[in-house]
Amino acid sequence: MDIQTLRIFAAVAREGNLSRAADKLALTQPAVSLQIKGLQAATGLTLFTRSAQGMNLTRDGAALLPLAEKVLTAQGDFKNAAASLHTQVRGRLRIGTILDPEFTRLGAFLKVLVEMAPQVETELRQAMSGEVLAQIERGELDVGFYLGTPDQSLGVNDFESNRPPALSARAQAAINSVANQQDSRSSLFAVRELTHFTYRVLAPAGWGPQVRGKGWKALAALPWIATPPASAHHRLLASVFGPLGVEPHRVALVDQEASMLDLVKSGVGLSLVRDSIAMRESHAAGLVIADQVSLQSVLCFVSLSAQRQAPVVASAWKALEAVWS
């Protein structure tokens, strides 16, 4: 027996009439009658009795009807599942991650993404903020988290704040060129600001007299734990120390936030730290927060504008909105 035979059996059982069942199935009555006879022969059972009212299920027929309907339902589910696989997003999504997963809500983001697009394979790459942006621009990552906004990475504001009052035509043309690059770079990326937060300057325990009540210029003379140019810390500190015409006293170069915090605890020097972490470590380890300075930043999610509607990338944006709405 095949699916069509079971479909005819179920239709006759529901309609109680060969003609009506044939109409429902767009078949002729003789064809339906022949199929019922064949099914009864194959099972060795009498499934229907005839009466003036039509076709009535026997006890055996009534026992088999739920099983036939179960098979038909399973076939429908199979067809629907197969059809849905044609419309599901497939592919690999390369995600640039930064900082700790809790801050970026990475776990919640991936959970929603897997539920929304189960056929998408994710690849996570941890890096510094600037490296994530550069890899997205080069097409090596599809999406990623970034501190600041992409147009800030060119350093136009720093350049403008350091220029002398009177500029030559050549210098002004250079500034305009960089500004144009900034506009172009900004339109290159699709950006969603997720959350604004504050960076504080954190010092080792016992450094209260050196940092409390001090401004940026005084703090620059103290030992600093520096970060590579690709880091958000580097960009933020450059925007402060550049206009003052000072360079911080760098004693170590570190590219991991956890290592920076460990060096502060060890008494090596100062570091930028997110406000929540600074408060926690101040209470837990007695580290000192500089009370006169702070820097504002923003966590963003970024992709290339040209890839924003690509199915795999669009699924990432949809998952992000569910987590950060």
Image (cartoon, helix red, strand yellow):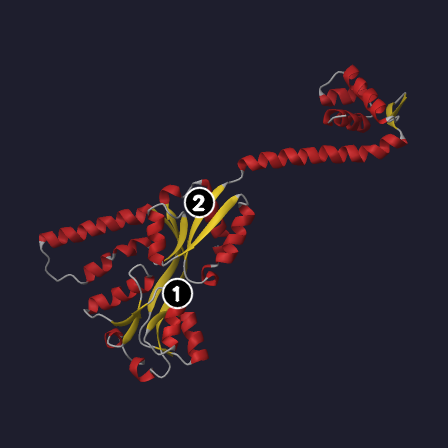
Picture residue at 36% right of the left edge, 68% below the top: 199
Q: Is residue 319 visible?
A: yes
The x, y position of residue 281, in whole percent, is: 43, 76
CA distance separating discs 2 and 1: 26 Å
| Residue 140: image tag | none
Toward which corner of the image does residue 148 lie, by quadrant? bottom left
The x, y position of residue 236, in whole percent, is: 30, 64
Q: Secondary structure at mark 2?
A: helix
Q: Amino acid at mark 1?
A: Phe
Toward which corner of the image does residue 213 lie, by quadrant? bottom left
The x, y position of residue 106, in whole percent, is: 48, 57
Q: Residues within 10 Å of mark 2 (few under 14, many from 20)?
A: many
- 8 over 247 or under it: above or below: above
- Along the line of sight, which residue is nearer the eye, 103 or 190? 103
- Along the line of sight, which residue is nearer the eye, 98 or 292? 98
- Along the line of sight, which residue is nearer the eye, 188 or 204? 204
What residue is pinned by disc 1? Answer: 197
Picture residue at 31% right of the left edge, 46% below the top: 187
Q: Which dot, 2 or 1, sits closer to the camera?
A: 2
Q: Amino acid at mark 2?
A: Val
